[in-house]
Image (cartoon, rainbow, N blue to C red):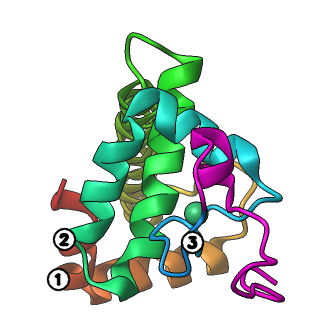
Amino acid sequence: MKDGGRKQGTMSPCAACKLLRRRCAKDCVFASYFPADEPHKFGSVHKVFGASNVNKMLQELPEHQRSDAVSSMVYEANARVRDPVYGCVGAISSLQQQVDELQTQLAQAQAEVVHMKMHQFSSDHHQPPSNSSPPSENVYQSSRFFSSPNKMGQSLWSY
Ligand SMILES: [Zn+2]
């Protein structure tokens, strides 16, 4: 669809050449990545990076990497337009913060699990558990817990 019907002389310019008001040559570096039906993509990339810089960045890459580079530039440019101060760094640091918070929560939950299993284990040996769990389940869970100390140690204490 991108290149469908592109023929010398009758072709319509790609989104980049249309915005730059120039003739879209047969070997136009933008044509494969900025189709005429998605003008906003080149619009924001041009606004943030400038057409000649985009051209230069694409020329420096092997062709199989150019499409990914364009996606990344479009993402970065859109983020910069939305957030002129932080750009995509705003999104990255907000997600990083979420990751940190969730890792803290996970560590707390895992510590709680260990605490509960320890408590359950000592209850089994000294007195019946005060909660309503059936004793058979407790024995099963405690034996499973203590039969694989290495696995538990790795998953719980490697943080
Ligand atoms: Zn073009």
Task: Give the residue furthest to the top.
Answer: 85
What secondary structure is the stretch in magenta mostly built from?
Answer: loop
Residue annotated with mark 1:
150
Instruction: Tell which of 85 and 1 is nearer to you.
Output: 1
Q: Amino acid at mark 1?
A: Asn
Q: Is residue 122 magenta?
A: no
Residue annotated with mark 3:
138
The secondary structure type at the circle numbered 3 is: helix
Q: Amino acid at mark 3?
A: Asn
How far from the left and from the top, in percent, is residue 13?
Answer: 71, 62
Residue annotated with mark 2:
153
Is there any visible trace of residue 23 in the rendered image?
A: yes
Q: Is residue 39 left or right of residue 103?
A: right
Residue 6, by quadrant, is bottom right
Q: CA distance from mark 2 to mark 3?
A: 20 Å
Task: Give the magenta part as a residue range.
Answer: 1-23
State the residue at coordinates (38%, 35%): 50
Image: 142 above or below 104:
below
